[in-house]
Image (tube, rainbow, N blue to C red):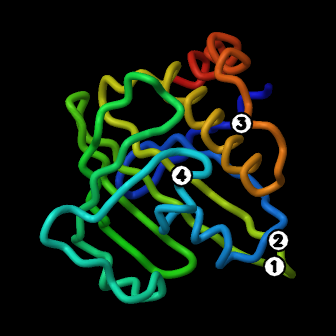
């Protein structure tokens, strides 16, 4: 496995950024982030919080903004449910969310761009003071490789191939 994350300054602060290319139309990749079936295939399960009905279609971007879901990662045995708030939704190109847990809040953004049936994915994690980049980096490499495997039909990667092997790259970045 190879570490792929790099640092980038954003108007919001320092981001840890990852890129992947998927041989799939943007709508299909978008569904991997915005539908319960799509996320369950690679990262976790979610449901609209009580009292919130889902928008009629995933194409209703502004209908998602401000809504919350309860999300649980499915590749970790000890994963606890997290509260996720949709901050920005511009189907099928941008999704920005805040994931709140006991460990704090993570601000994540996904940008998608399609050219001739191939979708370029740029995933950004806004870093906060004290974030442990040596565990965040390998974690996102692992999960984004799970996304690629879900799209290609390849076997799911094994976490032990990422940790601790990729930590040195992220320690050098941070």
Residue in view at x 61 percent, y 51 percent: 41
Above or below, 24 against 144 in this view is below
Residue in view at x 65 percent, y 13 percent: 168
Above or below, 17 against 159 in this view is below
N-term mark: 4 or 3 = 3
Q: Secondary structure at mark 1?
A: strand
Q: Secondary structure at mark 2?
A: strand
N-term mark: 1 or 4 = 4
Label placed on residue 40: 4
2 or 4: mark nearer the eye: 4
- The residue pinned by badge 3 equals 4
Distance from label 3 to label 1 (Cα)? 22 Å
Q: Secondary structure at mark 4?
A: helix
Label placed on residue 165: none
Please, which residue is most extreme toward the left here? 51
Residue in view at x 59 percent, y 63 percent: 32
Q: Quadrant of residue 38?
A: bottom right
């Amino acid at each position: 496995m190879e570490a792929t994350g790099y640092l980038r300054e954003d108007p919001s602060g320092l981001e840890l950024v990852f890129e992947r290319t998927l041989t799939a139309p943007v709508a299909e990749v978008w569904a991997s982030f915005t539908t319960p079936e799509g996320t369950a295939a690679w990262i976790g399960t979610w449901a609209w919080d009580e009292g919130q009905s889902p928008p009629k279609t995933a194409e209703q971007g502004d209908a998602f903004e401000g809504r919350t879901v309860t999300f649980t990662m499915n590749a970790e045995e000890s994963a606890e449910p997290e509260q996720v708030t949709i901050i920005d939704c511009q189907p099928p190109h941008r999704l920005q969310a805040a994931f709140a847990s006991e460990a704090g809040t993570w601000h994540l953004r996904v940008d998608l761009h399609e050219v001739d049936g191939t979708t370029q994915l740029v995933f950004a994690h806004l870093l906060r003071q004290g974030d442990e980049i040596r565990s965040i980096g390998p974690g996102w490499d692992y999960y984004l490789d799970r996304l690629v495997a879900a799209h290609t039909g390849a076997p799911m990667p094994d976490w032990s191939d990422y940790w601790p092997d990729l930590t040195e790259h992220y320690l050098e970045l941070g």
